[in-house]
Amino acid sequence: KDWLEIWNDVFMQYNKKKDGTFEPLEQQNVDTGMGLERVAAVMQNAKSVYETDLMQPITEKIHQITRNAMFTEGIQQNPALLMETEKHIRIITDHLKAATFIIADGVKPSNVDQGYVLRRLIRRAIRSARKLGYKDGNLTSAVADTVIEKYGHTYGHLKKQEKEIKNILNMEEQQFGKTLEEGSKQFTKIAKKIPDGGTLDGKTQFHLFDTYGFPPELTKEMAKEWNIRANDEKGFEEAFRKHQELSRKGAEQKFSGGLADHSAETTKLHTATHLLNAALRKVLGGHVYQKGSNITAERLRFDFSHDAKMTPEQLKQVEDLVNKAIEEDLPIRYHITSVEEAKKENAIGVFDERYASMALSTGESEVKVYVVGNENITFSREICGGPHVARTGMIGKFTIRKEESSSAGVRRIKAVVEGGPEEIEFASEEKPEGSRQ
């Protein structure tokens, strides 16, 4: 007889010491947890959580969407195939339900932290759908519709974020479709050269990931299908470590805004980059963050997080905001503070381990925060290595020349500045009140 665990108790009685021995806890407790969806399954006399009144509409939706692809003649007479099909249906249900909630909580697909967990959930669901033969490209948002319909009355933020959820899912599905297509071609070329039972080295696995965005876990799944081992974790980690070292070598340049030199023209463009970043956040929203920057004496190039091509109206708004800030001749000062204090000030910056190693090139966890504005208005507050002009009026006229895609979820703007004085003053440090200048 099959039994379903709906509740468990953990009796916390001992403390394990460093030497491996145990000692009784002074305060002994019972940690208890119950699975609400499992309780629903029991109360509704369902065989699993996927047959409850909340989950079944989602699985039915997936069955409906994938029916033409998976229900070929004879599948009902093939228990193994039927079981495999049901496994993929459940993966899609579980993963896309979770993804819908995660996106509603403000997380976006990426290659780091929570964003990577989200991306893996979405991509594994898409991979399962493709295993069922489905390739149309709107599965994720269609499933999200049903999730929001069933859970939205209790979790109101699902309905509020519905448009954002579906847009993100659609974009991720389209992008992953391209990744799968190109990555699968490359994997097949490589796999054909490896003998049956052979090993796919870690360096090649990392190449598939770094160059084509092909997830390591997907490489391992496909390797199994080809009867190839993909267990060279050491080789993968070594390739990844070398990649990180190369990235770190260029980190100082990124931290200072991609500045190639400190001439008047590059300093003007560097300062304009900060105004551009602030203007983009005002027009497009707080999800905009710098993803890369490169500045020469002729132009600036700025990469930023955004999912869609900017409209001509949006580009004009951004350009006008930057030029208005330049016309107002706002003062620019900087102060040195800790990363934690910079966070409290709401300074724009990517707060990760890079700051500990690159801040001020001192190895200390201090940063420069540049503030563009006066006592009446703060146009920009951003962490940067500098330098900047002393006042925005020194920049000259700002013009956006091009807006284009850089990579998935990242847009790129190329812009120039014209005019402004040939000789400039550099922004100076703003000392705390009472300190000696």
Image (tube, rainbow, N blue to C red):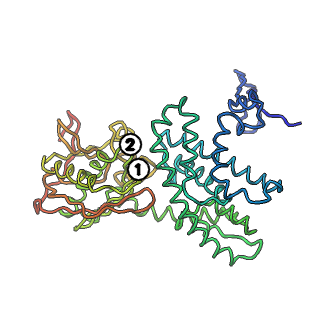
Dot 1: within a 10 Å radius of its alpha carbon, few (fewer than 14), some, or many (20 or more) residues? many
Question: Residue placed at 60% from the left, 49% from the top?
Answer: 121
Q: Quadrant location of the C terminus?
A: top left
Q: Nearer the viewer, residue 208 or 367?
A: 208
Seen in the picture, residue 266 relative to 432 is either above or below; the reply is below
Residue depicted at x 73% and y 23% = 30
* Nearer to us in this view, 12 or 33: 33
Q: Residue furthest right?
A: 1
Residue hosting label 2: 339
Please name whichever residue, 94 or 429, is drawn nearer the observer in this view of the structure.
94
Quadrant of image for the N terminus: top right
Q: Position of residue 273 (x, y in %)?
A: 27, 55
Q: Residue at x 30, y 50 (%)?
A: 280
Question: Which dot marks residue 355?
Answer: 1
- Do the residues under discs 2 and 1 have CB atoms within 8 angstroms? yes
Seen from the viewer's position, the closer of residues 180 and 389 is 180
The image position of residue 392, as x and y in percent, is 16, 51
Residue 77 lies in what quarter of the image? bottom right
Residue at point 67%, 49% (across, down)? 63
Amino acid on which disc 2 is placed? Val
